[in-house]
Amino acid sequence: MSRRAPAWLFALAASPAFLGCGEPRQEKLNVVIVSLDTLRADALGAYGEARPTSPTFDRFAAQSVVFESAFSQAPMTAPSHMTLFTSLQPSVHRVVNLMGEAIRAKAEEGEESVQWRVDPAVTTLSEVFRAGGWRTAAFHGGGNLTQSLGFDQGFEWYDGKPKNGMNANAERLFDFAQSEAWLDAHADEPFFLFLHTYLPHAPYAPPPPWDRAFDPDYDGPIPYREAYVRAMTSGEPGPPAPGPDASPTRQRMAKHTPWQFWGYVDPDDPRELEHLKALYAGDVRTTDDALATMLAALERRGLAERTLVIVLSDHGEGFGERGYFEHPGKLHRELVHVPLAVRGPGLAPRRVRAPVGLIDVAPTVCELAGLAAPPEMQGRSLAALLRGVDEPPRAVWSEFVWRWRNGPNGPEPLDFVRARRDERFTVIATKKGAAATVELYDRTNDPLERTDLAALPEHTARLEAFVGELAVHESECAAVRARWQTLPMGELEEGAFDELRKLGYAR
């Protein structure tokens, strides 16, 4: 059971003004947030992909407000989703991905983990809705969305068990039956529903026909779904370790879990890389089919006309553009440019070019539902943009913390990377120990952020201004962070390590 919501929320929920001057309960706006994990924006037709990877999302986008320049605040699942739910920067809520092996070792030694959960005093989006009279539920893919990090706050039902059908890339693919049963039970009540699937997260193992649809002539060593699942479930030995002459990239990826997939991949071979991307495209198409099931369930129940539906991803994925794969602690475009499409009553389809962040989703949803957003939220409401009113653009910050130090108000960032994106420029500042670097990209002329302009003298003034902006951002985050305690992670649910292992976070 989730903790009780703050008293101010119950008082607000009981006020006549909050209730919409006596509007009947069934007139409240339903909200469904669909998170498709690890889905980079440019893998979708609505964002430029030429292959037929996303017919359902593309149709949804044509009916929605599409944010062309939406950016995640972190390149990993746990910090990104906690920002989605709290509208706090990752360095403020301090939640990071589960550290698989480290957590297990600490637990076995009887030591307290250094893994932190969100302070229960932080008000989440689900808590706002629950206090306002909405039914709240989440069906998710487990792993880094564990309740031990505080993600269950405000949810009456928080389900990350394999039987809920949302744990993609395991023995059982997407199955919406559990979520539909919950909808049937609450279709006549206002509801806030969060749906999450790890499709298309690695390992890329789409089912037929999408396993071969985008590269039908491949006959190399990378396993298809049937071989991968068989190896994972039967304990079959994986491939031999790469020899000493293998590239550093292959050496690094071959150590990755699940070994039965990455152990066969040579990411430095152009042909293998082409097939890796094709498998990811197949996973994207499988994800799109899952989205079709979700949306059809709303249509069949007559809920679409009174439901706000938001489809997004928590972060993107790298395919060797800068020498790395998957989504390590970097903030380049391929890792943080995410889809964000919003469909709802009274919202005319349009495309918005202004940069926005996932940090803006929570205050936006609150305003659209007629709820007061908690004052500590760092994002801004996008409701005006959704309604067709242009506003002055605002820079979007993303960040990732590698190492923390103990400060007077608890742990604070020591080694980190932060990125600032305005309408045209991206600046990425990295600090590790005594070393500090900065990158500058002009997205007007270099939309993929490949050409670093930081060394050019004509940009000196711009970078000097960024130093001041970074100082202001750090100061603002520190002031908000000081309000919250740093608490150890709660006990992991049964089966959590199995989910982490399947996704490559633990052995």
Image (cartoon, grey):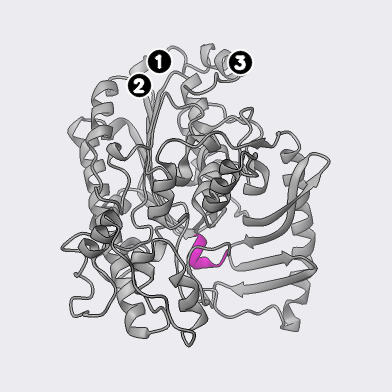
Judge whether residue 332 is colored magenta: yes
Disc 3 marks a residue whose amino acid type is: Ala
Type of secondary structure dominating the magenta stretch: helix
Please say if the residues under marks 2 and 3 sit with CB atoms less than 8 Å apart: no
At 51% across and 26% down in the image, what residue appears? 127
Residue under the point 50% across and 45% down: 81
**Could you say which is closer to the camera, residue 57 or residue 117?**
117
- Where's the C terminus, which quadrant? bottom left
Alpha-carbon distance for marks 2 and 3? 25 Å
Q: Taking 203 as reference, is 466 left or right?
A: right
Q: Which residue is mark 2?
A: 27
**Alpha carbon distance from label 1 to label 3:** 23 Å
Extreme residue toward the front, this view: 109
- Secondary element type, mark 3: helix
Instruction: Name the element at disc 1.
Output: loop
Q: Please say whether residue 347 is visible from this viewpoint.
A: no
Could you say which disc has been placed on residue 7 in the image?
Answer: 3
Circle 2 sits in a helix, a strand or a loop, which is it? helix
Image: 114 above or below 427: above
Question: Residue 117: where, in percent of width, then height?
Answer: 60, 38
Disc 1 target residue = 23
In the image, residue 77 lies at what x, y percent?
49, 50
Q: Which residues are magenta?
A: 331-336
Q: Position of residue 67 (x, y in %)?
A: 45, 54
| Displayed quadrant of residue 400 | bottom right
